[in-house]
Image (tube, grey):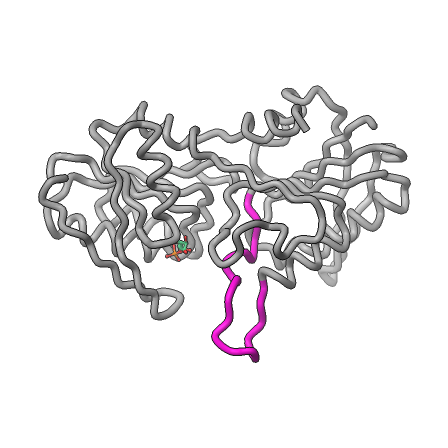
Amino acid sequence: MSQMLFSLLAENKLSEKLIRYLNCEQGEVVLHQFPDEENALTIKSPVENKHILLLVDLDKPNQKILTLIFFAELAKELGAKHITLIAPYLAYMRQDKRNSLADSLGAKYFAQLISRYFDSIITIEPHLHQYKTLDEIYSIPSMALHPTTQVAAWIKAHVDKPLIIGPDAGATEWANQIAQIIDAPAIALQKIRTSDREVAIQLPPMEKFKDYTPVLVDDLISTGRTMIEAVKKLNDIQMKQATCIAVHGVFAGNAYEELLASKVSKVVTCNTIKHQSNEIDLTELITDYLKHN
Ligand code: R5P
């Protein structure tokens, strides 16, 4: 089945690179917004009997989800055989637990919605903490790719004597994997989040790491509070200025500026969401998977 790649609401440069690497056709879709802010779209390219790859940036998902669903409905009406959603950043995954049965469970509901309209999904480093695999909530074939080697390579090339730090329990395993690749030490911090913007961080004993460069690694930065509180603690004990690395730079509000102002050496993200901090290119992570599957 021949492939056609559409880029919808995707502001990053990934789509151009994907087309080049995959050597597939590029589909054209035109979006229109009516004066009352309702959306419409027109698929200009022939999709009949094709395998459609739909690349979409899923940050700020509420503004995008209807367009996504309309695209899937229309492409199927026009005869598309299979639609793979490529969402480098998969939204709603952090809503993976609830305090009471009266709370909504966004990760599951979002997964059910996407599974209804798409035939398969590819994403990068989704927030798999409560769920061990996407299969627990997505009923379509899913693939979670991990940019561990790419992040490790960036650290090796740019940081002298790195100490890899997972800022919370969820990031510990990933921090250890990165550290192992580059033969660096790794530690985990303890984090307690009491609200969206309130985070308390505790450091383990740090004496033996005094001459290392702290490198905080996490799956995403949203409010920035996790990174900012961790950096404060490291600065309090006169560690070298930290480098903060996240796969997804969600950066809610002024998070990026606030993080920079907290005396970090550098903030680096992967290009899953377009941002000035994108320094780690994950195109090949996606194309390698697509070429072999
Ligand atoms: C939490 O489990 C995640 O891995 C991140 O640490 C967290 O979502 C970051 O959020 P924020 O930037 O709002 O502290």
Q: How many marks?
A: 0
Q: Is residue 95 magenta?
A: yes
Q: Is residue 169 magenta?
A: no
Q: Tell me if 157 is positioned left or right of 83 in this view.
A: left
Q: Which residues are magenta?
A: 89-106
Front residue of 100/229: it is: 100
Find ligand 1 in the image and state its quadrant.
bottom left
Q: Position of residue 77 (x, y in %)?
A: 90, 46
Q: Position of residue 246 (x, y in %)?
A: 40, 43
Q: Tell me if 252 is positioned left or right of 29 in this view.
A: left
Q: Residue at x 56, y 58 (%)?
A: 92
Quadrant of the image containing the C terminus:
top right
Q: Tell me if 238 is positioned left or right of 13 in this view.
A: left
Q: Residue at x 24, y 36 (%)?
A: 185
The quarter of the picture where residue 110 lies is bottom right
Q: Position of residue 208 (x, y in %)?
A: 11, 40
Q: Residue at x 44, y 45 (%)?
A: 249
Q: Position of residue 99 (x, y in %)?
A: 47, 75
Q: Residue at x 69, y 44 (%)?
A: 141
The quarter of the picture where residue 264 lies is top left
The quarter of the picture where residue 252 lies is bottom left
Front residue of 44/148: it is: 148
Residue 21 vs 61, above or below: the answer is above
Quadrant of the image containing the N terminus:
top right
Q: Tell me if 195 is positioned left or right of 159 in this view.
A: right
The main secondary structure of the magenta stretch is loop
